[in-house]
């Protein structure tokens, strides 16, 4: 939700910003993207009265980042043909700025650099080659993040599972097989962490009840009391998935 700043930051142009509370965040983080402008990520329960001082300290960074975002919006082609200039991994509180470099390499690859910079090199001028490289990178990130998350939650909830795989599924966030193999959609990384946790709880409960019976939902309710609210919110979860992840 966009908000209006209620304090003066002198020359910093911050007419609009958004605040996102994260269960996993330990400190305040500032992200700037052409699509979303300034996004302030705060830990759960953070005292928002502290934000003016934090933003004043970051005035120069915000000003430079705002100029960059404005330039990117002017240069960006229509969404149907655009390569993304940033990748927002809501689930793990990471925003990656994407740069493209055409080289003679036979493969198009996405490699991580410092300060959350992601370089796509190779046949980087080709949209399909670039987005495929970004999807492969997202899959690697998902395996490194979602599988340990599921394992930790399995131990916490005392709901063991057999194995897990990560795929780029089109219609499901996750699924559980009769032999307790849990399949996770790499697009889960794009969702807020509260929704990812709900999906993981949901699938772990399927290791006990492989259906959506009353007993299943009763178990879900014991493990995640707010599941009804989260389930409704997840119904609109595809809004977090950019077009380049689907094509």
Image: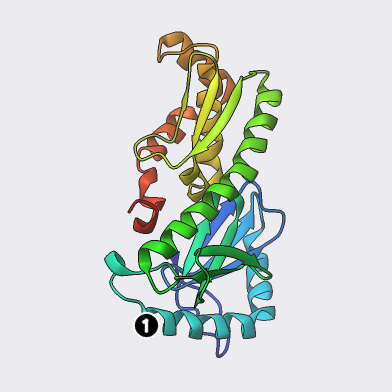
Name the quadrant of the C terminus: bottom left
User: Would you place residue 183 above or below residue 37 in this image?
Assistant: above
Badge count: 1
Q: Quadrant of residue 153?
A: top right
Relative to residue 77, is residue 110 depicted above or below?
Answer: above
Please state, as top left, top right, bottom left or bottom right, where the N terminus lies in the image. bottom left
Relative side of 185 to 224, left or right: left
Q: Is residue 134 left or right of residue 153?
A: left
On screen, residue 192 versus residue 57, left or right, reads left
Q: Is residue 133 left or right of residue 53?
A: left
Could you tell me which residue is drawn at 62 percent across and 32 percent down? Answer: 150
**Depicted 240 relative to depicted 153: above or below:** below
> Looking at the picture, how far across and down is residue 189, in whole percent?
52, 47
Q: Position of residue 163 (x, y in %)?
A: 60, 24
At a point 37% along the width and 82% down the height, the residue shown is 75
How far across and how far down the image is residue 142, in percent? 57, 45
At 64% across and 49% down in the image, what residue appears? 44
Residue 91 image point, x, y percent: 56, 48
Judging from the image, what secondary structure is the residue with disc 1 in?
helix
- Write down the residue under mark 1: 75
Front residue of 193 and 184: 184
Specify few, some or many for label 1: CA neighbours under 10 Å numbering under 14, 14-19, or 20 or more.
few
| Vertical relation: 155 (above or below) 11 | above
- Residue ID at (44%, 42%): 168
Residue 155 shows up from this direction: yes
């Amino acid at each position: 939700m966009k908000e209006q700043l209620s304090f003066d930051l002198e020359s910093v142009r911050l007419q609009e910003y958004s605040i996102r509370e994260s269960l996993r965040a330990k400190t305040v983080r500032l992200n700037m993207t052409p699509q979303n402008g300034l996004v302030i990520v705060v830990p759960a329960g953070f005292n928002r009265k502290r934000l003016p001082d934090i933003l004043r300290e970051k005035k120069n960074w915000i000003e430079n980042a705002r100029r960059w975002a404005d330039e990117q919006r002017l240069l960006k082609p229509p969404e149907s043909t655009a390569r993304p200039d940033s990748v927002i991994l809501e689930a793990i509180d990471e925003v990656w700025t994407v740069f493209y470099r055409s080289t003679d390499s036979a493969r198009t690859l996405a490699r991580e650099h410092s300060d959350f910079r992601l370089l796509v090199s190779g046949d980087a001028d080709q949209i399909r080659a670039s987005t495929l490289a970004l999807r492969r990178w997202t899959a690697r990130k998902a395996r490194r993040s979602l599988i340990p998350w599921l394992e930790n939650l399995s131990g916490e909830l005392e709901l063991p599972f057999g194995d897990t795989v990560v795929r780029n599924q089109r219609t499901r966030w996750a699924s559980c097989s009769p032999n307790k193999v849990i399949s996770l959609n790499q697009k889960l990384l794009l969702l807020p962490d509260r929704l990812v946790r709900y999906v993981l709880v949901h699938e772990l409960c399927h290791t006990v009840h492989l259906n959506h019976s009353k007993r299943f939902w009763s178990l879900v309710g014991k493990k995640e009391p707010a599941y009804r609210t989260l389930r409704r919110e997840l119904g609109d979860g595809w809004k977090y998935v950019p077009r380049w992840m689907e094509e």
